Image (cartoon, rainbow, N blue to C red):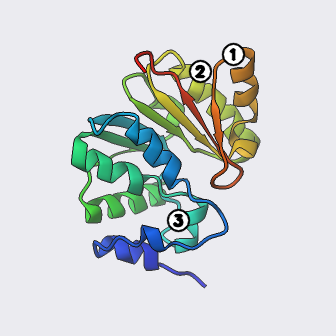
């Protein structure tokens, strides 16, 4: 049975994020830590993947990172660009952003066509499986020269090739035990 209580709370302006109960560790602490690296300054964020479903179980499985990034952009400035190949997912992200009052720039299409330098944070959370693994590596290669922090979700399905690439290039990364199979952060800022 579907449960839309989390989405309804956001639409009504109620913060229930601290009340989420799940055996899966939420990604929120990692996302908030990365935001804290920018000392409450404006941050430009490029996010691959929008809110897949408003069903509360997707809040845990999909992460809903918009709901963490968006309030930071609203409070401190910057931008949040979200790219997805699915119009329904983008509509979900738009509805939540509109209700919560944070700005969002939505792009329908493949992230590889939109990803470019100029952002402080890149969150690569696209397709799962072999295709996602290939896409994540291609996306990272387009931005690896930037001064940014890159987050990659679901290591076993989206970052197998990327981890090999990072090791071969001796690029430092951190692994976080959150979400579905862990998350990687790659801090490639030049002025840490």
Residue, x 70% and y 42% (percent of image)? Answer: 155
Where residue 168 appears, as percent x and y from the top left, is 75, 16
Along the polypeptide, which appears first: circle 3 or circle 2?
A: 3
On screen, 2 above or below 45?
A: below
Is residue 89 visible to the viewer in this orientation of the structure? yes
Q: How far across and how far down the image is residue 64, in percent?
A: 48, 58
Disc 1 residue crowd, few under 14, some 14–19, many 20+, Cα 10 Å: few
Mark linked to residue 61: none
Please name the residue shown 32% across and 72% down the image. Answer: 11
- The numbered disc on residue 141 is 2
Nearest to the observer: residue 62 or residue 177: 177
Q: Which residue lies furthest to the bottom in this view?
A: 1
Residue occupying the point 76% across, 40% down: 130
**Number of numbered discs:** 3
Q: Quadrant of residue 180?
A: bottom right
Q: Is residue 155 left or right of 67 when viewed as pictured?
A: right
Kindly identify which numbered label has been placed on residue 59. Answer: 3
Q: Quadrant of residue 24?
A: bottom right
Q: Nearer the viewer, mark 1 or mark 3?
A: 1
- Observer-nearest of 110 and 120: 120
Q: Is residue 85 visible?
A: no
Front residue of 178/102: it is 178
Q: Which quadrant: the N terminus? A: bottom right
Q: Residues within 10 Å of mark 3 (few under 14, many from 20)?
A: many
Q: Name the residue under label 1.
A: 170
Q: Earlier in the sequence, mark 1 or mark 3?
A: 3
Q: How far apart are marks 2 and 1 (CA)?
A: 14 Å
Does residue 72 appear to the left or right of 28 in the view shown?
Answer: left
Residue drawn at 45 percent across, 69 percent down: 18
**Label 2 vs 1, first from the N-terminus:** 2
């Amino acid at each position: 049975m579907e449960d839309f209580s989390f989405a309804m709370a956001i639409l009504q302006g109620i913060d229930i994020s601290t009340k989420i109960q799940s055996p899966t560790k939420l990604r929120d602490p990692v996302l908030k830590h990365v935001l804290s690296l920018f000392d409450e300054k404006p941050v430009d964020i490029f996010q691959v993947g929008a809110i897949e479903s408003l069903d509360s179980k997707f809040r845990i499985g999909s992460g809903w990172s918009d709901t963490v990034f968006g309030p930071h952009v609203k409070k401190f400035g910057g931008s949040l660009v979200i790219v997805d190949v699915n119009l329904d997912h983008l509509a979900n992200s738009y509805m939540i952003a509109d209700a919560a009052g944070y700005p969002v720039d939505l792009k329908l299409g493949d992230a590889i066509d939109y990803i470019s330098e100029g952002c402080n944070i890149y969150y690569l959370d696209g397709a799962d499986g072999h295709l996602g693994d290939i896409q994540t590596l291609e996306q990272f290669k387009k931005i690896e020269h930037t001064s940014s922090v890159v987050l990659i979700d679901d290591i076993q399905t989206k970052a197998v090739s990327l981890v090999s690439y990072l090791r071969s290039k001796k690029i430092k990364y951190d692994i976080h035990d959150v979400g579905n199979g862990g998350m990687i952060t790659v801090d490639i800022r030049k002025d840490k």
